[in-house]
Image (cartoon, rainbow, N blue to C red):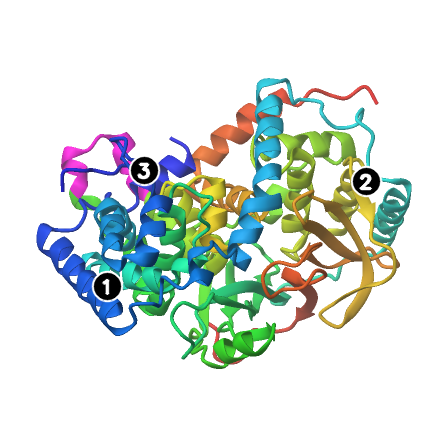
Amino acid sequence: MDRELNGGVAAIPDVSTDSEIIRRAQSTPAAFAELYDRHAPSIHRFAARRLGEQTADDLLSETFTVAFEKLDSFDLDRADALPWLFGIVTTLIKKHRRLEARLWRAEQHADRVHLTTEHSDDALEADLAIGRLSGAIRRLSKADRDTILLYAWGDLDYEGVAVALGVPVGTVRSRINRVRRILRAAAGRLATEEVEHGRADVAPQGS
Amino acid sequence: MDELTLLRKVRSQPTGPTDEALLNGRARLVEHLAWETASSPMAKTAPAKAVPVKTHRGMHTAGWITATGLVAAGVATALVLGNVVGLAGWRGGADAAAADTLDQAAAAAIATSDPVVAPGQYLEVATHAAYAAYVPVPGASSDAQDTVYLESQDGQMYVPADTSQDWVWVRDSGKPVQTFGADSERAAAADTGDTDETVHGVGGAFYGSPADVTPAKLAALPTDPTQLLNEIYRTTLGQGQSRDGEALVWIADTLRSGIVPAAVRASLYKAAALIPGVTLTPGAANLDGRTGVAIGRDEGDGTRQEIIIDPATGLVIGEREVLLKDLGEMPAGTSMGWTAVTTSVVDALPAGVAK
């Protein structure tokens, strides 16, 4: 692939927008393959991170096939189809709940000690915090989990997550805020620092 | 390193598909597209389809959501850049009816003594909750919209008298609790559900991660309502739909933990009464079969975050996010996410969950 997508932002300006490709695909299905070439790597990376490489391989064609079948559900006023595609792959990921639960469990209890020889103390602490974070992810509601992972791993903005999940952007904001608070507490050390610094900032109110 | 940076470090960023996987996927797609062209050449070219027909999803994303999102982002930025310390207290507060109700609930909470958990006993926090789940319609033509139903997230948490000891959390498998029309009903019927789970956590640290709300954290909160609200503003800094809306969400999240002592509950009610834009929902509010009053805030994006309390006892019944406009199949008035909490003291853990 000569086009590398990072964070869902096309590095090279394209001749046509996603919505133009989709418009063309309505009369010429073969044109839809252009959308695949453009976004398949991003979709695969996201799916692989949630479910592993092998399942992600399967989800690749499934996502785009389903997308093509639901072409009319794409809002042609939007130039970028990536949030819409992330919404479809997120729905497909739901069929693999058990696999995902297993991966998070493994993540949480991953033996990271072997990394210590080449890592600084800071890195070790980060590793421990990741284990705690994974525990926190497991206790989230599914809606909260989908939201934060689209945001953190899918690199969608609030509006993109709202499009992907079909919920108001305000709901996305609330969910992300709630989850970040939970994750911050889970990371432990970070939370302690912040509370200590924060306390001094709260000035007494002359009420 | 903040929590998002950390989350981005969980599982290394995959390198992307191998060329083989990419080509295989493409070949399968192209085959499907060719089949589509051959089998129904007119399918995508009929005039009705050539004109962009806005679907539910298209409509609600194109309209009111985006506008409020941009405004909220601007407001949040302004508040981050400005000095947010001392935001509470001088910008007005809840409307008179809501403030009265909250003050009344605060007084009732103080007058009500919390149940005493004796050594060996547990505080049982039973939670009934439901959230919107978006799923494909089983057996429907594949270009159909996803449908939505509400799925339960119930559980019972057992907090020991000595809260530094082992907490137990019984998490029921999620199951559909509310559907919206035939498609929604069929999708709900096809839900295979999760498995039940019982987890243990010393001091409430389930799955090895510290609890969001703990007795120690609650005890550390300022008792003065203005200082408490400032602390909440600081905690939720720069995030959420609106500063005031997010403060209310924080209060709702804390209250729904079910472990907030009466005195802290009273302070939280009084803090909520200081939040601008907080209003009383007229009439009685029903949640999970119980009746109370709803205090909430219209977020301007078609949703209203509410806390349901029993003003006579000052007890929290729960919290919910109510739709003020239709959203897909869910009509205005639907609680698209809600949690109801009841607490009681029990002498022992239920059979089968002891460690």
Q: Which of marks 2 and 3 is in front?
A: 3
- Find the magenta span and give its range: A115-128
Disc on res. B33: 1
Image coords of residue B224 (percent x, y): 77, 33
Image coords of residue A53 (percent x, y): 19, 56
Classify B271 as above or below B34.
above
Q: Does the magenta stretch include residue A116?
A: yes
The quadrant of the rendering that contains the N terminus of chain B is top left
Quadrant of residue B72 within the rendered picture: top right
Left or right: where does residue B228 sit relative to residue A75?
right
Task: Kindly indicate whether the residues beneath marks 1 and 3 are on one polypeptide chain.
Answer: no
Disc on res. B273: 2
Can residue A94 be spotted in the picture? Answer: yes
At 37% from the left and 52% from the top, the residue drawn is A86
Left or right: where does residue B167 sit relative to residue A136?
right
Residue type at mark 2 is Ala
Q: Does the magenta stretch include residue A61?
A: no
Image coords of residue B108 (percent x, y): 87, 53
Q: Is mark 3 on a helix, strand or loop?
A: loop
Mark 1, Cα crowd under 10 Å, few <14 / some 14-19 / many 20+, is many
Q: Which of B3 and B33 lies nearest the eye of the viewer?
A: B33
Q: Main secondary structure of the magenta part?
A: helix
Disc on res. A7: 3
Residue type at mark 1 is Leu
